[in-house]
Amino acid sequence: MRETLQDKDEGFTQLHSLMTIEEIARLRPIWIHAASGEIEYARPLIRELKKKYPETPLLVTYSSPSAKKILGGLDEVDAWAALPWESAAAITDFIEKWKPRVLLFARTDVWPVLADTCHQLGLPSLLFAATFAQNSSRLRGLSLSP
């Protein structure tokens, strides 16, 4: 818990390529967010995105610092960072800093203020690799087609 708080407070970022944050932002990265375990679900997507769009940087954010061990072994990821605090101001600052072209949420680690801020700023977002039971409370308010 202490490491999570420290990473968020300090805006932990690790660059895994030779590019600077500014260069990555200029190229408008694809942003993938995953909790630590969900990075395993994101791994095939990360590999395919890098194959299909080799010139587009990949930025991954995480909720738990245990993800840093996994991310260190993913050569396709250009940068990873702690997800900012769940506030519109912190998220807006993060988006303005990195200038992502899209946000892809892995499985179920969707944060309401993050999703809403992306929507307000016109940043497209998508949930992938998610599974829900038909009676899941997470689906309340959503329209489901059979």
Image (cartoon, rainbow, N blue to C red):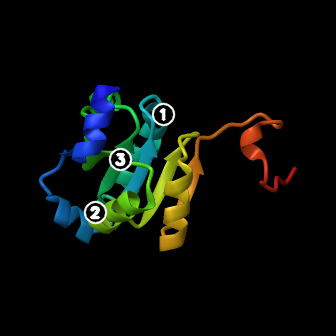
Q: Earlier in the sequence, mark 3 or mark 2?
A: 2
Marks 1 and 2 sit apart, C-alpha to C-alpha, by 25 Å
Which residue is denoted by mark 3 in the rendering? Answer: 60
Q: Is residue 72 left or right of residue 46?
A: left
Locate the N terminus by quadrant: top left
Kindly tell me whether residue 48 is visible in this rendering. Answer: no
40 to the left or right of 51: right
Find the distance from the CA under tag 3 to the CA under tag 2. Answer: 16 Å
Which residue occupies 23% across, 62% down? 24
Per the image, the residue denoted by label 2 is 55
Instruction: Kindly state the secondary structure of the residue where label 2 is placed.
Output: loop
Q: Nearer the viewer, mark 3 or mark 2?
A: 3
Which amino acid lies under the numbered mark 2 shown in the image of this protein? Glu
**Tag 3, which secondary structure?**
strand
Q: Quadrant of residue 70?
A: top left
Dot 3: within a 10 Å radius of its alpha carbon, few (fewer than 14), some, or many (20 or more) residues?
many
Is residue 33 something one can see in this rendering?
yes
Query: What is the three-letter code of the residue carrying label 1?
Result: Glu
Q: Which residue is rendered at x = 14% and y = 59% of the image?
A: 20
Q: Nearer the viewer, mark 1 or mark 2?
A: 1
Q: Secondary structure at mark 1?
A: loop
**How far across and how far down the image is residue 40, in percent?**
45, 31
* Above or below, 79 relative to 73: below
Nearest the viewer among 88 and 137 is 88
